[in-house]
Image: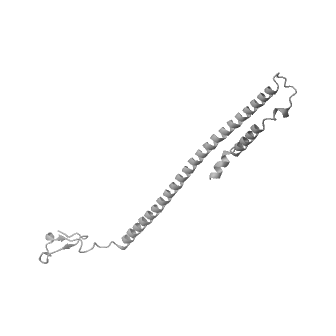
Amino acid sequence: MAIPSNRCFLLNSNESQNHSSAVYHPHIEAPPLPDSPKKDKIQSISMDRDAHLDSSLKLSARVEQFIKQEEERIVTIQQLQADLARVDDTASVITRSVNDMLLHQSDLIVVELQSRFLDKDWSFVSQIDAYQNLDDEEEVAVEARILSEGVQDPAMVCALRL
């Protein structure tokens, strides 16, 4: 029986000719080194593997960073959408309030005119007489218009948040 070339065996001194009683001891002698071209190829493959592993780890870190940035952008967009919805709601409330005030103002004008002219002959009433007692209502209407002008452009509000 022949001894394999890549394994190391200890032989008893009196059994050196008889290989049947050989004992395998891997820690005694290292396997033979491969030929130089094979050794270079193995080292090259090992270095390539290390480079690919390093590159892969760097790319994974960049991907995680991009994912985190995109999640932050999504949260910002959701906040802006909520802000835009609130601005739209506020604008519609202000518009309704202004319209209601204008209707109320016109009702007050009609009531004032009816109280002054019970016989419903309004032909000689001037425009100045109709608006004499409505200064307070006009101030409220002007304030409401100023408020509504501030929210007419919801895109401006969103742009300020960015």
Please identify the quadrant where the N terminus is shown: bottom left
Q: Residue at point 73% right, 44% down?
A: 146
| In the depicted structure, whether residue 10 falls above or below residue 65 | below
Residue 32 lies, with reference to residue 109, above or below; the image says below
- What colour scheme was applied to this rendering of the protein? one colour
Front residue of 71/54: it is 71
Q: x%, y% of residue 9?
A: 20, 72
Against 100, is 63 above or below? below
Residue extending farthest to the right is 124
Q: Position of residue 13 (x, y in %)?
A: 13, 78
Q: Residue 36 lies in what quarter of the image?
A: bottom left
Name the residue located 11 percent from the left edge and 77 percent from the top edge. Answer: 14
Count the labels in the image.
0
Residue 64 percent across, percent down from the top left: 48, 57
Residue that extends furthest to the top in the rendered view of this protein? 119
Query: Residue at 38% across / 68% down in the picture?
Result: 42
Q: Quadrant of residue 27?
A: bottom left
Q: Is residue 126 left or right of residue 155?
A: right
Q: Nearer the viewer, residue 159 or 37?
A: 159
At horizontal 78% and vertical 29% (from top left) the residue drawn is: 112
In the image, 16: left or right of 114?
left
> Camera-side residue: 110 or 152?
110
Image: 76 above or below 135: below
Residue lying at the far bottom of the rendered structure: 13
Quadrant of the image occupied by residue 22: bottom left
**Residue 128: horizontal and vertical position, in percent?**
85, 34
Residue 109 or 5: which is nearer the viewer? 109
